[in-house]
Amino acid sequence: MKKQWAVTLSFLLIACVAAHAETPVWHPTSGHTQIPLWPGTPPGTKPMPGAEYVASNPQALIGGKPVTAVSNVSEPTMTFYAPTGTNTGAAVVVFPGGGFEILAMDLEGTDVCDWLTSRGVTCILLKYRVPSIPYNWHCDCRPHNFELSVPSLQDAQRATRLARFHAAEWHIDPHKIGVLGFSAGGYLVAEASTNFKRRLYAPIDAADKESSRPDFAVALYPGHLTADDKTLNPNVPVSHETPPTFLLQAEDDHVDGVHQSLVYYAALKKVDVPVEMHLYAHGGHAFGLRPTSNPITRWPALVETWMGTIGMIPDHR
């Protein structure tokens, strides 16, 4: 537990140090362009602790690579990654994790897009506003803050609506748009899956006439869903309209705890929402897609199979 928590905390500590030096905002690799989510000032904008910056700790490696942490995001964007394989028509809006304090933009973002696009799935990487939910990272304090992450959820809803609005232009099936997120991003997946009828901002253009309901959802080592083994966070009001969901977590995840997925799974089953859950003995937290000796890091193959069973991509079983 302490090793994994130390790795997570180290990203934030180096970010704090980097805040005192000039550092660039995050940009995608060449050939990909960030698209502003909002035509003007985002709704409910609040002052950030400082300017956006990027930090990486070369001493804290996951899968043999450092992690890029983006902080103080006040101008949310989405980056479009077109399929490199045969286009399936499916698209996934990706929510990197980071405790609503930072965004792990490569480990839980661009790495995901590399995988999805190679499988013919359009990837839309969301750089959502953080900090969003206050949380004390200086101690292993539980339970997580259960508040609705309003700025982040506004960004998630807007990104899904924009994807539907541009579906024809982007060669996306508007009925095959899902969401995928890690840790805090996994909580954002649950929020987006259960609050799509809740209008969190005033419509600003034609895109906001589109639904923000995901057609499917993937939550990986999610947090903020429960404080115990039985009570679901009331800010994720599960109903029969919640989309089909895939859950994955390690039993030795001591940052969020496997009970997060278990409680959400039980709530989905209770209202007959199609749900698939995979639990592994080992893996910890924040492993992303990077291969390690733990079998849990082969989870992308499980998601591909599941997406085939629910009709989002061709079923190759």
Image (cartoon, rainbow, N blue to C red):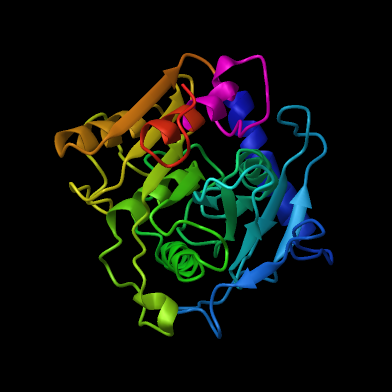
Residue 184 visible, this orientation: no
Q: How many numbered marks are there?
A: 0
Looking at the image, which is closer to me, 65 or 135?
A: 65
Give the residue drawn at x 43%, y 84%.
205
Residue 10 visible, this orientation: yes
Q: Is residue 36 above or below residue 90?
A: below
Q: Is residue 179 above or below residue 166?
A: above
Give the residue drawn at x 51%, y 51%.
91
Q: Is residue 175 above or below residue 151?
A: above
Q: Residue 119: horizontal and vertical position, in percent?
A: 61, 38
Q: Residue 311: horizontal and vertical position, in percent?
A: 38, 39
Q: Quadrant of residue 29?
A: bottom right
Left or right: residue 154 compared with residue 65:
left
Q: Is residue 301 magenta?
A: yes
Left or right: residue 87 compared with residue 262:
right
Q: Residue 215: horizontal and vertical position, in percent?
A: 36, 50
Give the residue drawn at x 69%, y 46%.
84
Looking at the image, which is closer to me, 37 or 44?
A: 37
Viewport quadrant of the N terminus: top right
Q: Is residue 286 above or below residue 243?
A: above
Give the residue drawn at x 54%, y 65%.
129
Looking at the image, which is closer to me, 245 or 254?
A: 245
Looking at the image, which is closer to me, 187 or 254?
A: 187
- Boundaries of the magenta span: 283-303
Q: Is residue 28 magenta?
A: no
Left or right: residue 197 compared with residue 219:
left
